Amino acid sequence: MKICIIYHSYSGITRGIAERLKASCGGDLLEVKPRKDYNTLTAYTLGCRKAMNREADPVYPDSIDVSSYDLIVIGTPVWAWKATPVTNGAIAALKGCEGKSAVIFVTCGGKPGETVTVLKETLSAKGVRVVGEKIFVKNDAGDPKKVEDLASIIKSAGNTG
């Protein structure tokens, strides 16, 4: 099973989970970055407003071809109870994703709000079927058992997808 782990990480928490997933499940890591970086002020003002409105940032890479992968894993921080504009840009940049399965994970300090629901809708509109999900709240990201739970979801998805 060939896995592509696509993620955006502002503070490093989502990146840490993505790296542990690669170590556990294998696959290729792809960190998506905004064309224009956020700083502390713009992340919590402009970034959160864009997240609330489900806007997509221009990202690097501007095209993400997943046609050669069996499973897509997408990780995002939660900003204003939604996926970050960078993650929205990554999903918009997906190519060759029709008919693929995906597992999503989100990291947040509190409640994830509509993040998972919106990600499922957005991916479904691109022809991607979400077959698993995991929410990491506060200290969950540092809990090896929680990360291994996500790795098990990914491994199971690869065996059935």
Image (cartoon, rainbow, N blue to C red):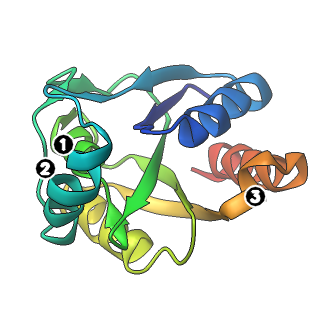
Instruction: Kindly give the residue lying farthest to the front in the view shown.
Output: 41
Q: Relative to residue 80, is residue 46 drawn left or right?
A: left
Q: Does residue 114 appear left or right of residue 43 in this picture? A: right
* Label 1 residue SS: helix
Seen at 21% across and 22% down, the residue is: 60
Measure the C-alpha gap from mark 2 to mark 3. Answer: 28 Å
Mark 2 residue type: Ala
Contact (CB < 8 A) between labels 2 and 1?
yes
Please name whichever residue, 95 or 136, is drawn nearer the observer in this view of the structure: 136
- The residue that mark 2 highlights is 56
The residue that mark 1 highlights is 89
Give percent across and percent down for residue 62.
Answer: 14, 24
Which residue corresponds to the image point at 39% horizontal and 70% vertical from the top-left? 115
Q: CA distance from mark 1 to mark 3?
A: 27 Å
- Of the pair 140 and 146, the residue shown nearer to us: 140
Q: Is residue 38 left or right of residue 35?
A: right
- Per the image, the residue denoted by label 3 is 139
Amino acid tagged 3: Asn
135 lies left or right of 91: right
Tell me: residue 83, above or below residue 94.
below
Looking at marks 2 and 1 on the same chain, the residue that comes earlier in the sequence is marked by 2
> How many numbered marks appear?
3
Mark 1, mark 3: which one is toward the viewer?
3
> In which quarter of the view is residue 132 placed?
bottom right
